[in-house]
Image (spheres, rainbow, N blue to C red):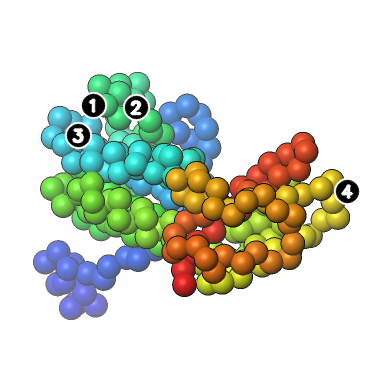
């Protein structure tokens, strides 16, 4: 205990590898549960700010990295702009984000989201969280935050393996596995469908790489390059996309 106290005093300590859960409302009164978001395959980037002018210098690269996934992974990567100690009102924090060219964010002024859970305080502070194991892929302060580092961490989080339960479609009630997949993507129907169901495989750029075919119990993806894809399942009345990763 004495040794641990000395190390802590000197600024050393164990490196936390998993996120800390929270359930709290954003500035629009919408409730968010961190672990639910991560379990659903989403990636959350949290940026704590005072806010202040210098805070924007290193927050903007993290924000830009999130936006770079807007086309390839629509709605899957979120940017949480959080007041450092929840002592700035929502209107001021939201206005700061807008004035610094960061309008596409979810804003919080809540003590439930604590940067102290991730080691050293200091503004700005950015963490990248993802995966069903609630992993921390990046944890940086101040000038150690940069576009390439945040973008790389997001990409790693998107490639994190998902369990079968995270690869389930809600409407069609299909299970897909394994994820990542090497050669054969298995598809299990858990519901009897009277309608005709077809599928397409779409890459991260939205390009169809395997054309519309009748849905079977397995899809051969051995010809695809490593990367992020979507199994787009369609009927005459509904359409749904299930993400998966090819890793030969």
x then y, percent, for residue 135: 40, 62
- Disc 3 designates what residue? 56
- Disc 1 designates what residue? 100
Graded by Cα atoms within 10 Å as few (under 14), some (14 to 19) or many (20 or more), the crowding at tag 2 reads some
Q: Nearer the viewer, mark 1 or mark 4?
A: 4
Asked if the residue at tag 1 contacts the one at tag 3, i.e. Cβ–Cβ closer than 8 Å, the answer is yes
Vertical order, 121 against 133 (above or below) = above
Query: Would you say residue 145 is visible in this rendering?
Result: yes
- Element at label 3: helix
Mark 2 to mark 4: distance in Å?
Answer: 44 Å
- Disc 4 designates what residue? 194
Q: Mark 3 or mark 4: which comes first in sequence?
A: 3
Of the numbered discs in the image, which one, if any, rests on residue 103? 2
Graded by Cα atoms within 10 Å as few (under 14), some (14 to 19) or many (20 or more), the crowding at tag 1 reads few
x then y, percent, for residue 130: 43, 56
Asked if the residue at tag 3 contacts the one at tag 2, i.e. Cβ–Cβ closer than 8 Å, the answer is no
Query: Residue at coordinates 40% horizontally, 58% vertically from top-left?
Result: 157
Query: Residue at coordinates 48% horizontally, 40% vertically from top-left?
Result: 74
Mark 3 to mark 4: distance in Å?
Answer: 54 Å
- Element at label 4: loop
- Element at label 2: loop
């Amino acid at each position: 205990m004495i040794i641990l106290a000395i190390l802590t005093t000197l600024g050393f300590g164990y490196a936390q590898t998993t996120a800390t859960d929270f359930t709290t409302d954003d500035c629009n009164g919408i409730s968010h549960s961190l672990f639910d978001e991560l379990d659903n395959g989403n990636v959350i980037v949290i940026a704590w700010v005072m806010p202040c002018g210098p805070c924007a210098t290193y927050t903007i690269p993290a924000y830009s990295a999130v936006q770079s996934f807007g086309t390839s992974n629509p709605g899957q990567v979120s940017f949480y702009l959080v007041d450092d100690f929840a002592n700035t009102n929502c209107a001021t924090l939201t206005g700061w984000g807008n004035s610094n060219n960061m309008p596409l964010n979810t804003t919080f002024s809540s003590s439930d989201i604590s940067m102290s859970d991730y080691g050293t305080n200091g503004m700005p502070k950015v963490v990248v969280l993802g995966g069903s194991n609630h992993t921390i892929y990046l944890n940086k302060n101040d000038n150690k935050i940069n576009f390439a580092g945040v973008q790389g961490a997001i990409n790693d989080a998107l490639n994190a393996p998902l369990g079968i339960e995270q690869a389930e479609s809600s409407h069609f009630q299909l299970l897909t596995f394994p994820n990542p997949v090497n050669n054969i993507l298995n598809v299990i129907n858990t519901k009897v469908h009277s309608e005709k169901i077809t599928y397409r495989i779409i890459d991260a750029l939205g390009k169809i790489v395997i054309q519309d075919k009748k849905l079977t119990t397995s899809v051969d993806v051995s010809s695809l390059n490593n990367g992020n894809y979507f199994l787009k399942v369609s009927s005459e009345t509904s359409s749904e996309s299930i993400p998966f990763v090819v890793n030969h």
